[in-house]
Structure formats: structure tokens, C-alpha cells
Amino acid sequence: MKLNKLQISIIACGWFYSAYFAIWAFIVYSTSNPYNAYGYGLAGTFIGGITKALTFFFVNGLIILVSSILIILDNRQRQDEIDRALQKTDYIRIILLIVAFFFALPWLFAIHGIFISDIPILNLIFLGRQPGILGTNFFDYIYPSVHLGLHHGTDGYLHISYAILLSILIFKMKNPIIRNVSIFGMGFLASYGLIAYLEDIFHEQILKRGFLPPIWHLIKLFYDYGIFFGLIFGLIILIFGVYYFHEKE
């Protein structure tokens, strides 16, 4: 069965944002100075811009490519059309996407070469151009709290968003093996993304204000071993997913 509009829209969304952010990464890193790019030595050069852009596109593009292959493989065994009507869980997804988008605003401005502290009203909520008054290293006290360009929080935001969108299709998959692989992949993507997302928020918006909440040490631990914890949480989500579909079927 051919890809339907819902599947095409989600896959296209992933490719679009991978390309869009990569283009802006090239623009920002090839035109910004090292200070605004957190000391990135190649900032302001073509090599610096293209290196950042290609690295970002390769990693995110690989995620979209694997997702696309899994969706296509599942479609080969599908005989019925996917129900595209909104479900109650879709409203939860929308709320999660809105919340993730709001707290990602400093990075979304940064990838466009703009400090969020230069934006009225938002500068009352988020740090941007200001150096931190507390940090994890010497550079946090020198460079802008939210440097221009890419952040691991940017990756985290995109991974969370794409995992939420992918979950719509995963719950409609027919092939158990492909579905389980997809659940694990989605779980890893969401978990690893959330860890990076939270670490960057706490680091840039809380720690650099001079606050050191006890939970910071736990978040930092999770981030330092992000891939390991992502795999663990991905496995846990897979177990719940297998149980859910076993009971459902």
C-alpha cells in the first residue's frame, strides 16, 4: 500500500526541519563570530558553517531515513487505510508539542542568529545574550548564556517532537516486529531527546541565573550518560508497548 497523506506529512515534516535547521546552521556559523558561538573557532568561516550544517543534517536525516523505511515496510503488509480522525491522545500530543516549543524558543531564535534577550516580553522570561553568573565551567561566565547556532537542546526538541509525531503512526502499525522496533526507536529518541532538552534548559535558564536546584545533579548525570539511559528508557517503553498491544489484541 502506498504512503497516505498522514504518513507523508510526518515524514516530510522531519525532512523539512532537518534541511531547514541545517541551512540556518550554515548561515549562522559561517557569519557569526566565535564569541557569539560559544568559542567555536571556525565560526565566521565557510568550513565552520558547512561542518556544523552537514553534521546536523546527517544525524537527523539518518533518524528520518530509518523511520521512513520502517513505515514503508509496515505498509507493504497493510491492507486497510490508516484512520486519520483525531483521537483523544492526539490532543495530549498537541499540548506536549506546544509546551516543548515554548521552552525551546531560546534555541529556535539562536538557530536564526537572534538572541532571545533582544526580543521584547520574551526577554523577561529567558536569558540570552547575558553571560551566566553561575556555570559548570569557566566559559559559562564569559560567553552568552544561550549562544547563537545549534544546541543539544535544539536536538532534544526536534527528537521529542518527531517521537511524538511518530507515535501516531506506531500505534497504527500492523506488523508486530516492525512495530516493536519502532516503539523502541521512538522510546530511545524521546528519552534521549528529553534528557538533552532538560539539561540545556536547566543549564542555560536556571543554573546561569545563579540557582543550583538539587535535581540539577541528577539531570547532569542522565545527560553525561545520555545514550545509556536513552537505551534503558527505550527498553522500558518497549516492554510497556508490547504489553499494551498484547492486551489490545
Image (cartoon, rainbow, N blue to C red):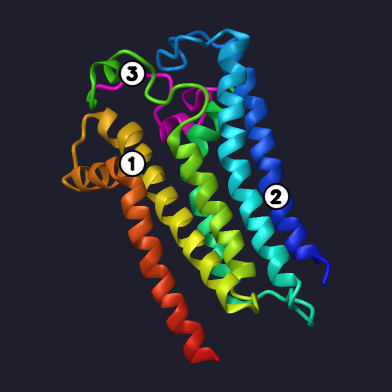
Residue, disc 2:
13
Which of the 4 image quarters holds residue 133?
A: top left
Q: Element type at marker 2? A: helix
Specify which label sits upstream in the sequence, 3 or 2.
Answer: 2
- Whether residue 89 appears in this view of the structure is no
What amino acid type is highlighted by mark number 3? Pro
Q: Is residue 32 magenta?
A: no
Specify the principal SS of the magenta part.
loop
Which of the 4 image quarters holds residue 217?
A: top left
CA gap, disc 1 and disc 2: 25 Å
Specify which label sits upstream in the sequence, 1 or 3.
Answer: 3
Residue 187 pos. (x, y %): 45, 61
Residue in the foreground of this view, choosing between 59 and 15: 59
Residue, disc 3:
131
Residue 20 pos. (x, y %): 68, 34
Q: For this view, does 107 lie left or right of residue 91?
A: left
Residue drawn at point x = 81 percent, y = 67 percent = 4
What amino acid type is highlighted by mark number 2? Cys
Instruction: Please rate how many residues cluster around mark 2, counting C-alpha atoms within 10 Å: few if below 14, some from 14 to 19, many from 20.
Output: some
Residue at the extreme right: 2
Specify which label sits upstream in the sequence, 1 or 2.
Answer: 2
Q: Are marks 1 and 2 in contact (CB under 8 Å)?
A: no
Number of the front mark, 3 or 2: 2
Residue in the foreground of this view, choosing between 246 and 126: 246
Q: For this view, does 40 lie left or right of residue 71?
A: left
Residue, disc 1:
199
User: The C terminus lies in which quarter of the figure?
Assistant: bottom right
Residue 215 pos. (x, y %): 20, 48
Residue 142, above or below 55: above
| Magenta-drawn segment | 114-133
